[in-house]
Image (tube, grey):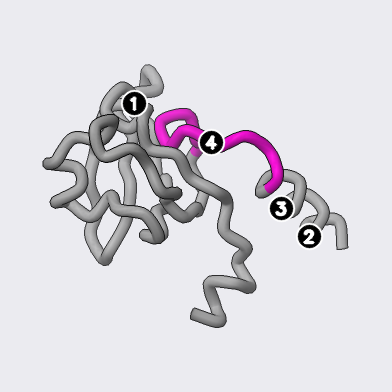
Amino acid sequence: MKSDFIIGALKNSRPLSLGEQSPGFRGRILPHDERGVSWRLRELGFVPGTTVSVLRRGPLGDPLQLELRGYRICLRKNDLAPIHVEPVDPVELSKA
């Protein structure tokens, strides 16, 4: 299928910054350097393996409204820049 090709191509490309994603994006947080991500974001659940969805962007592109671990949060792009994600296949989510 064409969508499988697109998802496969995205997974094999360079890591994507969470702060640069558009509404509708669903991804899994990749392992990251502990020094690059603030301890507060880690406490909020921004840890490797967590699935995160981008719900909305502010009028000027900042902040982003995200959903993860059953709650929603708004954060600025700069705060999310060091967090890298990989796209998640919707079929993969239904298996989990």
Residue at 34% from the left image edge and 28% from the top image edge: 58
Q: Which residue is mark 2?
A: 4
| Marks 2,3: beta carbons within 8 A | yes
Q: Marks 4 and 1, Cα distance to the nearest angstrom?
A: 13 Å
Question: Quick one: SS at disc 3?
Answer: helix
Identify the disc placed on residue 16. 4
Identify the disc placed on residue 77. 1
Could you tell whether 12 is left or right of 64 in the image? right
Q: Decide whether residue 57 is among the magenta residues.
A: no
Residue at 41% from the left image edge and 48% from the top image edge: 31
Q: Decide whether residue 19 is among the magenta residues.
A: yes
Sequence-wise first label, 4 or 1 = 4
Residue 75 image point, x, y percent = 25, 34
Question: Quick one: SS at disc 1?
Answer: helix
Q: Amino acid at mark 1?
A: Lys
Q: Amino acid at mark 3?
A: Ile
Kindly give the residue lying farthest to the bottom in the view shown.
Answer: 95
Relative vertical location of residue 6 with respect to residue 82 in this rendering, above or below: below
Q: Which residue is mark 3?
A: 7
Magenta span covers which residues? 12-22
Q: Marks 2 and 3, Cα distance to the nearest angstrom?
A: 5 Å
Q: Amino acid at mark 2?
A: Asp
Q: Marks 3 and 1, Cα distance to the nearest angstrom?
A: 24 Å
